[in-house]
Amino acid sequence: MRSRAVNRVSARSVLYPTAVPGPKAVRARDNRGMGSKDGIFRQQDDRTASERAGDARDRDGDGRARSARPRDGLGRPLPYGAQGVPRQPEGVVRPPLESVAEAQRLLDEGKPFHAHEVLEDAWKSGPEEERELWRGLAQLAVGLTHTARGNVTGGARLLRRGAGSAEEWAAGAGRARPYGIDLGGVVAWARELAAEVERGDGVPVDAGARAPRLRAGARGQGS
């Protein structure tokens, strides 16, 4: 159990580097609320005393601590009793094609936060030689989550970082279309969106309308 916990912390530190503003705010398991100032998200604990006590008592089916607070489509916590978006199950091992299809479905539905959970599972459970690929794709989903929340700086950085990771992996592996993923198109989409949000005024993007097309023929609206 100790080694699993250490691996989970290590994975988060790589996917959410501290150089990006508010990385923990993107995590579905973060119990804190979100505030904003000048378009940059900052962390704050806006829970009431009863909500904090409830979060401390929440457990999953295996008895592990896990907040039961509902979340919206971008992973932001909602008050207890609110109608939220069902969370993705944690630690699911899927075949690569299933991971791509499920991530695309969630992206098309405007749920990049949930898509990143699927891609993160693929990264942590996949073969060592493919982990940089899935990590880069997960970072792109987190970057889209940030831009949909209006976090221009964090979103643009993660979009470019994820694009660089995917591009570097493709060059090293000699695979431009692993599992049918159009890495060239995805990389171009990420860099174009990063430049676009930086030119704008911090207005959140429509996550569903700007979802990338992971595979040729998918419904995503990326470039």
Image: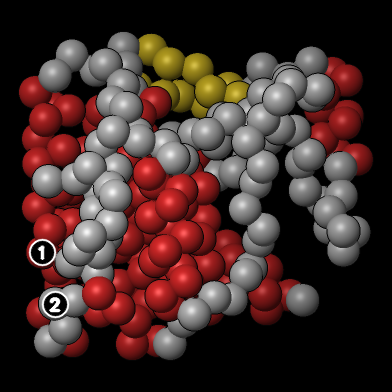
Looking at the image, residue 42 sits to the left or right of residue 30; the answer is left
Q: Residue at x 33, y 87 (%)?
A: 129
3D distance between C-alphas at marks 1 and 2? 7 Å
Q: Amino acid at mark 2?
A: Ala
Classify 223 as above or below 102: above
Q: Is residue 181 left or right of residue 59?
A: left
Q: Which mark is residue 176?
A: 2
Secondary structure found at label 1: helix
When the figure is inspected, residue 106 is found, relative to residue 132, above or below; the finding is above
The residue lying toward the viewer, choosing from 178 and 146, is 178
Drawn side of residue 24 relative to residue 66, left or right: left
Query: Mark 2 Cα within 10 Å, few/some/many (few <14, many 20+)?
Result: some
Q: In the rendered image, is residue 163 in sight?
A: no
Residue 128 rendering spot, x and y as whole percentages: 40, 87
Kind of residue indicated by mark 1? Gly
Q: Nearer the viewer, residue 51 or 76?
A: 76
Disc 1 + disc 2, Cβ < 8 Å: yes
Q: Where in the figure is residue 69, as x and y percent of width and height?
A: 75, 33
Instruction: Report the residue marked by disc 1.
Output: 184
